[in-house]
Image (cartoon, rainbow, N blue to C red):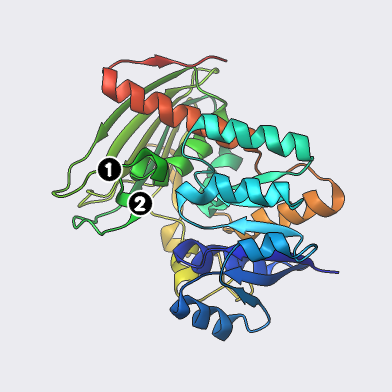
Amino acid sequence: MDLRVALIGYGTGGSVFHAPLISSVPGMRLAAVVTGSPERQRAVRERYPEAEVVENADRLWGASGACDLVVIAAPNRQHVPLARAALTSGVPVVVDKPVAASATEARSLAALSAVRGLPVFPFHNRRWDGDYQTAWRLVTSGALGDVQRWESRFERWRPEVKKSWKESADPRDAGGILYDLGSHLIDQAVALFGRPTRVYAEVDTRRPGATAPDDVFVALTHPGGTRSHLWMSATAAQLGPRFRVLGSRASYTAPGMDGQEEQLRAGLTPKHPGYGIAPPESYGLLGTPGHETPEATAPGAYQDFYAGVLRTLREDAPPPVTLTDAINGLEVIEAALRSAREATVIELDQ
């Protein structure tokens, strides 16, 4: 029997990412979508006619055995309350990033998860970017030698501020680009090189009318000596390379963004031929000056996150992403904010 999934929220996160990915994984079924918007309700019925449309999440908790997994793609300030409600009702949960607005809140969620014996899966889908998978292989295989510096960028040119909770300065909203894009960049670096020992950051709000950070640089020092330099910006009129990984033997540079988000926005899913496949002209370069060759980009596969969730719930396999991973990321974000306020390097407890 398929795992019945209830999705809370059908904005960009729910409609572009979660619903198509859930529906593409054999053994999973999008059973219900929670949204109070009449327009979004119509969109759900058109694209997923077999899914029940639910106006309020409270109806999920009142229907015993209605679903086997809850996915939370609501605004950030609702993540923890909804996750707590799901766990209390006896249902495991996937939570979009950031899992919580603070590491303290995330730790409280971890405590409830342990008491209830139910997993919480942070949706850190960018681990399944094709270029990141390629960089991971090159790093872990030793093809680059000792990695000295990991440079990673997630930059955009969005000079106009759009009214949204993502632009909110209220700490409960976890708005701003450090929580949004930074959650991905930090998670990728920590997954590869471990929890950092030191954090330095420059956090700026540059666009007229902006109240939340929109231009951020974060530097991490990892236990093995690798340094990660992470840029995230909404004010980049020209975009830098997505990755530049400098090793003692060779380096790898990936020019642009993974194409899965663009494909999903266009209506493609992992079921379509060519999904997640990067064209040869977008391949990164591997080597040294004068001896560089194109390195084929691994297929991107966001659906593998949900396939991993299914294996955890059905086969007791290790989770694709742990709540501890998310807590580490939030602690780095909080250290970065403190570093920027105090103009100093922050030492992290190990």
Q: Residue at x 41, y 46 (%)?
A: 180
Q: CA distance from mark 1 to mark 2?
A: 8 Å
Q: Residue at x 41, y 41 (%)?
A: 172
Establish if 258 lies above or below 269: above
Establish if 32 lies above or below 192: below
Callout 1 amino acid: Ala
| Residue 179 placement: quadrant | top left
Pick the front one: 20 or 221: 20
- Looking at the rendered structure, the secondary structure element under dot 2 is helix
The quarter of the rendered structure image containing the N terminus is bottom right
Left/right placement of residue 82 relative to residue 282 reads right
Q: Residue at x 17, y 42 (%)?
A: 206
Residue 191 on image: x %, y %: 58, 35
Left/right placement of residue 234 relative to residue 190 reads left
The quarter of the rendered structure image containing the C terminus is top right
- Label 1: few (<14), some or many (≥20) within 10 Å? many
Q: How many marks?
A: 2
Residue 335 on image: x %, y %: 41, 24
> Mark number for residue 69?
none
Establish if 190 lies above or below 265: above
Res. 247 visible in picture: no
Establish if 260 lies above or below 171: below
Q: Residue at x 66, y 77 (%)?
A: 51
> Mark number for residue 212?
1
- Looking at the rendered structure, the secondary structure element under dot 1 is loop
Residue 330 on image: x %, y %: 49, 33
> Mark number for residue 166?
2
Pick the front one: 10 or 350: 10
Residue 304 on image: x %, y %: 67, 56
Q: Tags 1 and 2 in contact by the CB under 8 Å rule?
A: yes
